[in-house]
Image (tube, helix red, strand yellow):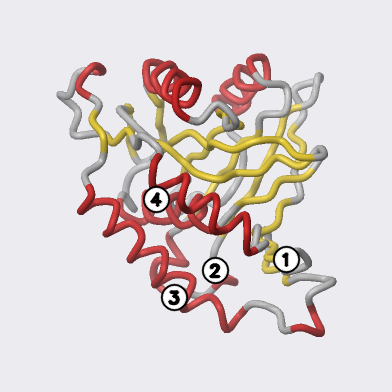
Amino acid sequence: MRARIYPLALGKILHHSISNINQEVAGLMVGKVVSDVVEVWDTVTGSQQNSPAYVKLEESVMALVAEVLLENLPDLYIVGWYHSHPGLNVFMSPIDIETQRTYQAMFPKAIALVIDPVQFSVSWKISDLKIGVFRIDKNKGIVPVRFTLGLQRRKVLESTLIGLQTLDLMPKGPDVKDEELVKVSATEKTDNIDYIVKFFSRAKKLLPGKKDRSRGVDSSKVRFNQEEL
């Protein structure tokens, strides 16, 4: 099994983790499975408990996101979760393993994405961007999942347009009640898109040229692949 992450989803994960660089953050990944490839089209976050080395997304967030998707975007569903390890590197802790087992119990092909954004937030070099995607096997072993950046033009456009329609659940603060989760404003959406455009404008020159498309670019745990173009 492989994973394919589309630009909007990756940009939102980066934005979320870098905007809260001193705290772990978490969110849900939304997409679909196509020919045994888990496609991540968008991400959604919401109320959570966090610290520099711990994060827990409130269970009500998943229930609300699942309901919104079922009613408005029935072709998409929750395909996993992401969280950050700021300055701690990329790995699955014992708590992460148990959390991932819960996701896989609900959706057997669910994946977990872990990101350490600290070095990248300083250098903006792709080689400093630490990302890993994982699953857990039946013996509680950690299984790395190969992933690529989805760059097929039609799906990039489709996932971006759908992402702009998705109900984004944003945490307002530690005292906010679960039922007070709100839809992100148009201004905040614009800010997110501006950030994503800025990131990919800087990253574009580091992507492979035509001669390299068949093999992609591998920077540590990050693999950008243009074979879909």
CB contact under 8 Å: marks 4 and 2: no
Q: CA distance from mark 1 to mark 4?
A: 23 Å
Q: Which residue is mark 1?
A: 225
Q: Which mark is residue 123?
A: 3
Q: Residues within 10 Å of mark 4 (few under 14, many from 20)?
A: many
From the image, which quarter does the C terminus lie in? Answer: bottom right
Quadrant in the rendering for residue 198 = bottom left
Q: Earlier in the sequence, mark 1 or mark 3?
A: 3
Figure check: 192 above or below 59: below
**Horizontal relation, residue 27 to residue 96: left or right:** left
Residue type at the position of mark 3: Ser
Q: Nearer the viewer, mark 1 or mark 3?
A: 1
- For label 4, the SS is helix
Figure check: 153 above or below 71: below
Which residue is at 58% across, 54% downward?
Answer: 6
CB contact under 8 Å: marks 1 and 3: no
Q: Which residue is mark 2?
A: 128
Q: CA distance from mark 4 to mark 2?
A: 14 Å
From the image, which quarter does the N terminus lie in? Answer: top right
Q: Residues within 10 Å of mark 1 (few under 14, many from 20)?
A: many
Q: Nearer the viewer, mark 3 or mark 4?
A: 4
Instruction: Between residue 158 and residue 203, name the one nearer to us.
Output: 158
